[in-house]
Amino acid sequence: MSYVLRLTKRAVKDLERLDLTTARRIRRRLQELASDPLDHFLSYSLEMERDKRSSRVGDWRILYQVKESENLIEVLAIAPRGRAYRKL
């Protein structure tokens, strides 16, 4: 089952600021997450907020939330590791 991806305004801005190569890698990962957002090889739940998840792409993190009832993945932010968790 495939999920619908929805990016917040913050996530769209974050993605637009990336260089082309990194943006492609992030988009590829988003497509993978759309098919299985809870895959433990692609992501993990955050300790501080269990309903949110993080996926690693190089030094970057994709922070998102899965809404099972709506079949939706809401991408909250895309940030370098050092700043990613401050953005929540």
Image (tube, rainbow, N blue to C red):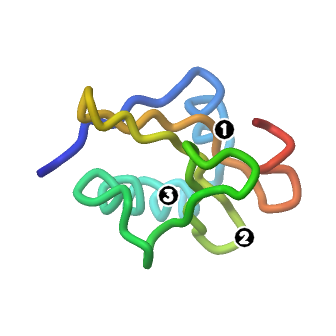
**Residue with the most extreme top position:** 9
Q: For the C terminus, which image quadrant?
A: top right
Q: Which residue is mark 1?
A: 14
Return the mark for residue 26.
3
**Residue with the most extreme left position:** 1
The part of the image, by quadrant, that contains residue 72 is top left
Residue drawn at (76%, 50%) of the image: 48
Q: Secondary structure at mark 1?
A: helix
Q: Which residue is mark 2?
A: 59
Whole-percent x and y of residue 6?
39, 29
Mark toward the start of the polypeptide (2 vs 3)? 3
Residue 64 relative to residue 31: left or right: right
Mark toward the start of the polypeptide (3 vs 1)? 1
Numbered marks: total? 3
Residue drawn at (86%, 50%) of the image: 83
Distance CA(mark 3)–CA(mark 1): 11 Å
Residue 5 relative to residue 22: left or right: left
Distance CA(mark 2)–CA(mark 3): 11 Å
The crowding category of the residue bearing disc 1, from other C-alpha atoms within 10 Å (few below 14, some 14 to 19, many at least 20), is some
